Amino acid sequence: MRIRSLLVAGALTISMLARGQDQPNIIWLVSEDNSKHFLEIYQSGGVFMESLASLAAEGLVYNHAFSQGPVCSVARSTLITGCYAPRIGAQYHRKEQIVPMPSGARMFPAYLRDAGYYTTNSHKEDYNLIKGDDVWDESAPKASYRNRQSGQPFFHVQNFGVTHEGRLHFSISEMDSIQNKTDPATVEVHAHHPDTKLFRYTYARYHDQHKKLDEQLMVFINQLKEDGVYDDAIIFYYGDHGGVLPGSKGYLYERGIHVPLIVRIPPKWQHLATGPVGSRIDGFVRFMDFGPTVLNLAGVPTPTHMDGQAFLGSNLNNEEVLQRNTCISYADRFDEKYDFVRGLRHGKFKYIRNYQPFNIDGLQNNYRYRMEAYEEWRALFQAQKLRAAHQQFFLPRPVEALYDIEVDPFELNNLAEDPKYASRVAAMRKSLQEQLQGLPDLSFIPEPIFIREGSKNPVSYGRAQQARIGHLQEIADLALLPPNEALPKLKKALKSSDPLAQYWALIACTSMPDGASALGKKINKLATRSRHTLVRMRALEYQGMHGQMDPQDLVHLLADCEDPITANMVLNTMVLLQDVQKKKFALHWDLVPPEWVENTRSNVTRRLEYLIGKRG
């Protein structure tokens, strides 16, 4: 072992000398569940954090940094690969099946190791992809850059969980007995939330967690100084996705994806910056850009499989970097709750395409609703005690929406129907459509089919299915057309020999405000006679949302499901019809195989617990 260590150290030294490389140390300080909306450095009424102020004074503050996916595993999969998650099959949280990296591709720290870096992660990973043995020298709670060879550059990730969503899972009794340091009367309740005692207390608790985060960051920064590495390190601070107050984490609104990003750049490495120290950068930065940026700072070329672009480094056109102003974002399944949303930010405008607009934002998600504020919000809605802006979370969404983020930061005023913005909506719609077709976006293949057919090589599968996926996307987008234009095309799709064409035509029919009653006879036939479970499910869903249906038809369909992922999709529809349409289902635990519910955290278990209560 001693000989091997000497050989490795010698090889590293020779490698670095051969490149003439004096490489910067690079550190990521990552806090969980933080949007920019709770930090004073970004938002009036936010928390002042000394640690961030000190980093900002010696670096750059990015005004437009986006996690792209609004939840841990999807965001972190984007970070570690530099890829658009739905292109590589990494878009679902929690993963039902882990997928491989694209052929020939590696997670970006592996390329740093090839360049002589010591790579460490303390300690959260949460990737939806298979991790190779070559990614980290250490990835564990106590992983440390201190264990590197003398003179060896390092890349270190330090994760901080003190602001995680779970820290707000307190009980009402705890609320009555524990006083926050932050006075609830002083917090600024955001425009999409009701201003109640409970919401104010929750805000105050979240502010307190930020203050604890500040203390932990300062301790780590001081450690870097004591170890003598602070002055030679480029330090990134960012949140791993948006915040956790209701309607943020798990949702594609700015509060779910717009994260803080500060990059501290010491004097030695300021030639790698795209602006003077202490300045604010308006150019857009996306999570898929982080890996290419770290590689570029280390002098390593960006692999061709990555979708991102470097935003720091001496070899960049700074003017071009500063003018970047677009970001694509994605939201799919989160735990047991299904959705399919894509977003496109261009400058101050945000375009959102809700592919299943009937899946209301407030649809039950057991983990989310462990937060008392979620429960209160829903109870106020059900009691009709909310004003219009606060009701939106529990109402069907528009098929497409446009928001002016500068004047409407919490995305409450949809401009898509305003004739003044028709040309902008059309342009952003077309841009998003073209980008999704070009990837292609694998979410147009329902999750159970993707896992069965494409999970062994998602990228190759996507290429082989690209024409089909493009056709499915075109069918889904029939929901954007006036009924007189859409119905003939939907009728044709409902007669298709491809069950997924029928599947998406049914979703489009359900998405139309007045339904597609002219196609009712065909939809009823699919609900009863289709040989494909997912087609029958979508047809029954249409009936439940736009007319009459026998709830027991869905119960029988659940009993016929051949896998737990399909069963969870059926259960998702049941929850939707129960909570929105007040349908009642005669359910019992024996409808599904016992192995599907052995794990108390399985999606099927969570859905059944909500619908019928825990097993006795």
Image: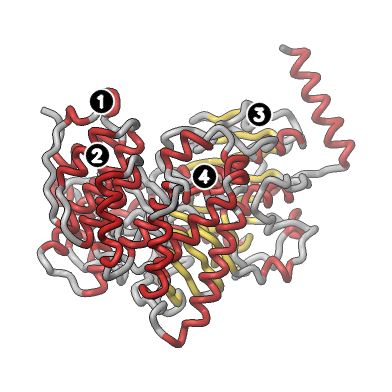
Classify 544 as above or below 283. above
Quarter occupied by residue 130: top right
Q: Nearer the viewer, residue 283 or 280?
A: 283
* Residue pictured at 54% horizontal, 64% vertical: 433
Q: CA distance from mark 1 to mark 2?
A: 14 Å
State yes or no: discs 2 and 4 in contact (Cβ < 8 Å).
no
In the figure, is residue 152 to the left or right of 531? right
First in sequence: mark 2 or mark 4? 4
First in sequence: mark 3 or mark 2? 3
Q: Position of residue 527 (x, y in %)?
A: 26, 49
* Residue of label 3: 134
* Residue of label 2: 557
Residue 181 in sight: no
Three-letter code, disc 1: Pro
Q: Nearer the viewer, residue 3 or 191?
A: 191
Mark 4 crowd level (few <14, some 14–19, many ≥20, 10 Å Cα): many
Quarter occupied by residue 289: bottom right
* Residue of label 1: 593
Label disc, if present, on residue 76 of the rendered structure:
4
Q: Position of residue 460 (x, y in %)?
A: 62, 40
Q: CA distance from mark 3 to mark 2?
A: 45 Å
Q: Nearer the viewer, residue 518 or 221?
A: 518
* Residue pictured at 38% horizontal, 48% vertical: 163
